[in-house]
Amino acid sequence: MMRLATLGAVLLGLAACAAPPPPTEAEVLTVACSAGINEACGYLSRGMSVSGRPL
């Protein structure tokens, strides 16, 4: 029984490592702009993030 619990924990750890990375801010803004959110399009056109840093 303990061996099965250990195996389950190892598999959960591997699954967490295999998860894709979160999207970048530029990707999120691109999707928002494609959805018609004009504010996101403005940030993209200026090449700036919402916090004011360059994308």
Image (cartoon, grey):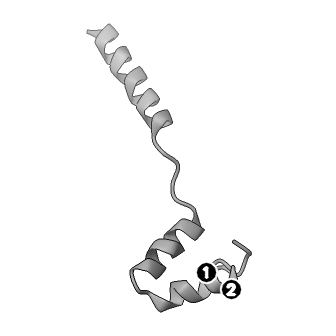
**Quadrant in which the N terminus is drawn:** top left
In the image, taking residue 48 as reference, residue 23 lies left or right, namely: left
16 is higher (above) or lower (below) than 9: below
- Percent across and percent down for residue 24 are 57, 62
Q: Quadrant of residue 36?
A: bottom left
Amino acid, disc 2 = Arg
Viewer-proximal residue, 39 or 2?
39
- Estimate the spatial distance between the alpha carbons at disc 2 and disc 1, rounded to whole Å: 5 Å
Residue ID for mark 1: 44
Q: Disc 2, disc 1: CB below 8 Å?
A: yes
In the image, taking residue 5 as reference, residue 39 lies left or right, namely: right
> What is the number of the mark on residue 46?
2
Q: Residues within 10 Å of mark 1 (few under 14, many from 20)?
A: many
Q: Quadrant of residue 5?
A: top left
Viewer-proximal residue, 10 or 22?
22
- Percent across and percent down for residue 15 are 41, 32
Viewer-proximal residue, 35 or 14?
35
**Quadrant in which the C terminus is drawn:** bottom right
Q: Report the label total.
A: 2
- Percent across and percent down for residue 40 are 52, 84
Q: Residue at x 33, y 8 (%)?
A: 3
> What is the number of the mark on residue 34?
none
Kind of element beneath mark 2: helix
27 is higher (above) or lower (below) than 21: below
Q: Quadrant of residue 11?
A: top left
Q: Residue at x 61, y 81 (%)?
A: 44
Q: Residues within 10 Å of mark 2 (few under 14, many from 20)?
A: few
Kind of element beneath mark 1: helix
Q: Residue at x 64, y 85 (%)?
A: 45
